[in-house]
Amino acid sequence: MGPGIVFALCAALFMGTATVLQAMGARRAVAATPGAAGSGARTLVAALRRWPFVAGVALDMAGFAAELVALRSVPLFVVEAALSSSLAVTAVAAALLLGVRLRRQEWAAVAAVCLGLVVLAVSAGRDGHGEGTERLRLAVLVVALALAVAGRVTERAAPRNRAAVLGAVAGLSFGVVAVAVRMLVGFTPRELLTDPAAYAVAVAGVTGFVFLVDALQSGSVTAATAAMVITESLWPAVFGVVWLGDTTRHDRAPLAVLGFALSIAGALALTRFGEAEQTAPPP
């Protein structure tokens, strides 16, 4: 249990710091290459020449690896709360590296996230070691495909609250990734090629990334990130308890619920840091 929580916290630390480093690299690239400001492809190429951006990408990869380990060893509700806390890491890192001023309520939100994680650590029990039935793994793949279609329909419909809707699609997709990773039967090539959950990881991972980027570019960063945090965190936590056997320690279920709620509430209060680049002062 202990090592699994450490990996979940490492994933949050890596991913939260990566957001700020990538923002630093992108801003430096735009400042050094004015013609790249209006082109996503040119900005990316220019950013890849800046060490903060490359370091951020490397940290994102390390964070995802740590998340995979955590998902296989601790309850889903612990991992999801820890990943949401990456917004607290981003907020603090943005204050230190980008000169962003945190308001008093945002420092309180950072404290709430930390307190919630401590409460979860002392109350969470074991993961259920459940992989689900073959039918359940197929259902997760169908959900991943349905979310890809739903996101595409939303893009074309262009509703007034498009950023929030696409953020919700991204969050639901990232939740599918977490659930599907937990349900993987094994990691040998043969097991992965024959496991519907492996295909669900691939489809939902791409879907989540694409629609999160679109959401952040479509409107309010706060609305997109808030929708993503809620949808990514809540349903996988419930799924793990109901279908995969995740538990809390004896008589500590209310404490675990409190810790989870504190972590998510704190993360929601920090949603403006969902894209650190847009909260930073101009270079």
Image (cartoon, helix red, strand yellow):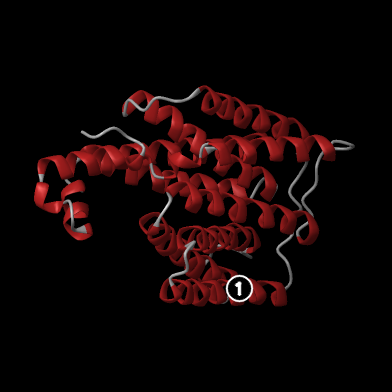
Q: Amino acid at mark 1?
A: Val
Q: Residues within 10 Å of mark 1 (few under 14, many from 20)?
A: some
Q: Position of residue 7 (x, y in %)?
A: 56, 39
Q: Nearer the viewer, residue 100 or 5?
A: 100
Q: Residue at x 32, y 27 (%)?
A: 97
Residue 64 point in image, percent of width and height: 47, 49
Which residue is nearer to you in this view: 151 or 252? Answer: 151
Identify the residue shown where x is 40% and y is 54%.
216
Residue 56 screen position, x and y as percent: 33, 41
Residue pointed to by mark 1: 143
* Left/right of residue 235 with respect to residue 154 in the rendered view: right
In the image: residue 177, left or right of residue 122: left
Quadrant the C terminus occupies: top left
Spot the residue most to the front: 160
Q: Is residue 231 above or below residue 157?
A: above
- Identify the residue at horizontal 56%, vertical 47% (top origin): 69
